[in-house]
Structure formats: structure tokens, C-alpha cells
Amino acid sequence: MAGPRPFQIVLAGAAVLALAGALWVKVIQPAMTETIADKIGQGDYALSATDGTTFTQETLKGAPSAVFFGFTHCPEVCPTTLGDVATWNAILEEEDGTELRVYFVTVDPERDTLEALTNYVSWAPGVTGVTGTPEEVAKAIKSFVIYARKVPLEGGGYTMDHSASILLFDKDGKLFEPIGYQEGEARAMDKIRRLLAS
């Protein structure tokens, strides 16, 4: 019995290559080009904001924004970061006549009510506080790939360990890049201006 002819082998090889090519274009390449950065901020969370709106993944669309996770009882990182944000927005207002919208999302929903957050962020221009039920906050923490953990204190009570970066999002709701804690005014302003120009 004769084996497969050379042209049949070539034809079979071409079919395999065509199938592999189709698989690459339709399945593998899109999965590779969609990075974890494309998924940050995406999820089914629904939180309450101090401006009376509901904070969802759709909130990130329409205009550039920044998202920072913290809590009102934070001893150092959160007030320092809010101070940085206030400085950045003051510079933007003075030099460019604009302001970056910023969302301060609590990692401590048990204590951070809308009233507490309103008082906490009211002095920082452009900042909106965000809170919700522990379940919804947990969804948001997961969606933004944030680290947050309750830490008991001696004598009772607790504090929170949490990520300290500010996440910048473009007008399409995609992660642009982070600003590290106390990264420096010049570097932060460069990132913000590039974001606003994108």
C-alpha cells in the first residue's frame, strides 16, 4: 500500500498551519495583548460617593481620573497623599485652568461612612470620597488589585495596612500608570499632564 504522496503531506501541513494561524488571530493573540492592566478597575462593584453618585467601573470613563484607596483613621499615608493631590490640583488650576478628578475609596467601610468621608476629603480640591458595604468594598479592592488588611492594635481597636499608590486612568477607563507614594512632585505632574493630554 502506497504512503501519502508529497503533495498530500504539504496540503495537510498547510491545513494545520492555517488552523494554527486562525487560532492565533482569534484566541491567543487577543489574550496576550489584554494585560492585567486592562482589567484593573473592571468589576461589578457599586459604591456610594460623597457627591451623591454611584461609583462603578463606568465612573472611570469619560474623563481622566485617579483612584486612591485609604481610610480616614490613617495616621500618615492617606493625609500625606491627600496633601499631594491638593498640591497637584492647585498647580493644574493655576497653570492649566484644569483639575484632575480623584476618587478616595475607603478600605475601612465599617468606620468610613459617607459623612466621615465627606469631612475627610472636603479640604482637597477635586477629591470625592467613596464607600459602601463591606461586600462591595471587597469587590472594588479585588477589581483594582489593591492590598488591604485589618491589623489589630494592642488594647483593642485596629488599623489598616493598604496599598499606597495612586492609580491613574485614561478617559476610556483603562489604567494609564500609577503614581508611587511620595514619588515627587515633578514626576507626578509629568504623569498627570501626560494623562490629561492623552
Image (cartoon, helix red, strand yellow):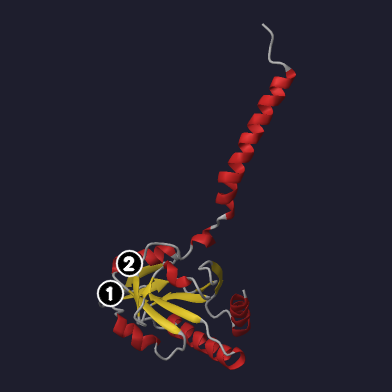
Q: Nearer the viewer, mark 2 or mark 1?
A: 2
SS at circle 1: loop
Quadrant of the image containing the N terminus: top right
State the residue position of label 1.
110
Residue 92 x, y percent position in the rendering: 57, 88
Judge the density around disc 2: few (<14), some (14-19), many (≥20) Cα neighbours within 10 Å. some
Dividing the picture into quadrants, the one containing residue 160 is bottom left
Q: CA distance from mark 2 to mark 1?
A: 12 Å
Total marks placed: 2
User: Residue placed farthest to the right in the image?
Assistant: 6
Judge the density around disc 1: few (<14), some (14-19), many (≥20) Cα neighbours within 10 Å. few
The amino acid type found where label 2 is placed reads Glu
Residue 118 x, y percent position in the rendering: 35, 86
Residue at (60% x, 48% y) in the render? 29
Residue 183 x, y percent position in the rendering: 57, 79
Do the numbered discs 2 and 1 sit on residues whose CB atoms are within 8 Å? no
State the residue position of label 2.
136
The amino acid type found where label 1 is placed reads Glu
